[in-house]
Image: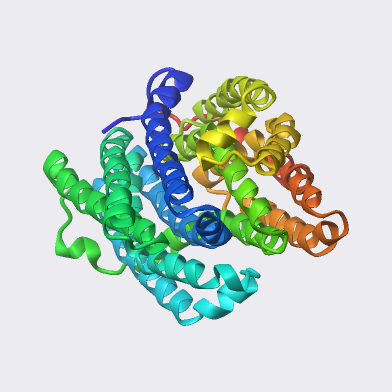
Amino acid sequence: MKDLTKGKPIRLILLFAVPLFVGQLFQLFYSLADTRIVGQTLGDEALAAVGATTTLSDMLLSFLNGLTNGFAIVIATCFGAKDESQMKKAMGGTILLGSCCAVALSGLCLLNMSGLLKLLNISPELFAAARGYIGIVIAGLLAATLYNICAAMLRAIGDSFTPLLFLILAAFLNIAMDYGFILCLHTGVEGAAYATVIAQAVSAFLCFLYMRRKYPQLTLKKEDFKPDMVLYKKLFGAGLSMGFMTSLVGVGTMALQTSINTFGTDIIVAHTAARKISSIYMLPFSVMGTTLATYCGQNLGAGKYSRIRKGIRDTVLVTFVWCTGVIISAYTVAPWLIRTVTATQKKDIIDTASLYLRVNTPFYYVPTVICLFRNSMQGFGDNRTPVISSSLEMIGKVLIALLLAPAIGYYGIIVAEPIVWFIMVIPLVVNMVRSPVLKMKDREGASA
């Protein structure tokens, strides 16, 4: 367990963030491996079928991941306040509520699968493969959620290293099973989906088993799972806020994908590759944001408000340095990265994906502020502002998909995100400046 309420803030934040970063890098690594293996062994059409549904799976996973991360903020606040009894009840509630939400969401989506795919404008030649792939991924949402629950609970008590170990295991297991299912069993794109779900299930099981042995003091009893309506209200307040915050972004991205899916296979492949690479570029934003949510939650519980202010300020400066390196990368090695991800040699695909990256990356300083501010706000209890900001992003992307993309084609998609970034950052900056938490003095007896 790691107490984030003592010590130099930026040092603690970076040490906590490094395992998160490596873990997310491995998660992206096996996502990229899926992309390359599917593209290399099954061809561009199969890759397009996977890419055309990625926004749907990302949206669902983002909601569930946000939900569990929101629950974990309540756990972190209890940990910071040294209230072990309430912390265990919050953990029990996290497991129950997170699992129920995952099962309900899977069932709802599977019952309406055809309608969802039609909403995405999946072309007839891609429909069967897309349905097979996304159906398996959605059926396996519980596996991903259970891993995220375990990881979120460990991060809440300051352990960001243990989840990394099991994420690395899942990455290598997924890649090995990709080859086994696709090349040996000839299961097509469904094999890639099976590999992902099985790897997540194994990782979740082993992570829970290890947590019980490493932290026996956190072993939950029957009474810790007994519903506590006051506590569950807090859990849902934080969880639904963060879940909606992330999934609203996904709804907007899915709206853009409906337009992209009408531009043909090459554009879908190019966009899929560009988004995979931009995910790597933006990885530190989300990692540092997740770290700040835990950091702010623990320090809020401890009443150390000056540490919250300093932690946010220093993290913004560090992440701006990364943004500068990303811009240089986009303008020097983007074509090579596209070829590496897709295994394609088509000039149109490489040029289109490179253009996407070169237009977007100079504006990355804005989403840096967005990620850090909205996660910090969640950490110190502002559940409303991040949802407002994400709603603005969703509305902006939907309008662009309906109005701009039909008028100027794929270039409308490329410029969509910089436009909405500038819109959605406004309420975050305004409310961060106004936040009473950032103006409060440290609680008596809580030294920084």
Please name whichever residue, 139 or 338, is drawn nearer the observer in this view of the structure.
338
Q: Give the image location of residue 235, x and y in percent.
A: 42, 59
Q: Is residue 440 visible to us here?
A: no
Tell me: residue 126, above or below residue 341: below
Please name whichever residue, 147 or 227, is drawn nearer the observer in this view of the structure.
147
Q: Residue at x 71, y 64 (%)?
A: 262
Furthest toward the bottom, the residue is 111
State left or right for residue 350 relative to residue 152.
right
Q: Residue at x 16, y 44 (%)?
A: 210
Q: Give the image location of residue 71, x and y in percent.
A: 40, 54
Q: Residue at x 50, y 58 (%)?
A: 46
**How is colour applied across the structure in the image?**
rainbow
State left or right for residue 88 relative to residue 17.
left
Please name whichever residue, 323 or 427, is drawn nearer the observer in this view of the structure.
323
Asked where in the image residue 261 lies, by quadrant, the reply is bottom right
If the image is split into quadrants, where does the C terminus sit?
top left
State left or right for residue 403 relative to residue 386.
right
Q: Is residue 393 visible to us here?
A: yes
Q: Give the image location of residue 53, x and y in percent.
A: 54, 62
Tell me: residue 335, above or below residue 404: above
Q: Give the image location of residue 153, x and y in percent.
A: 31, 47
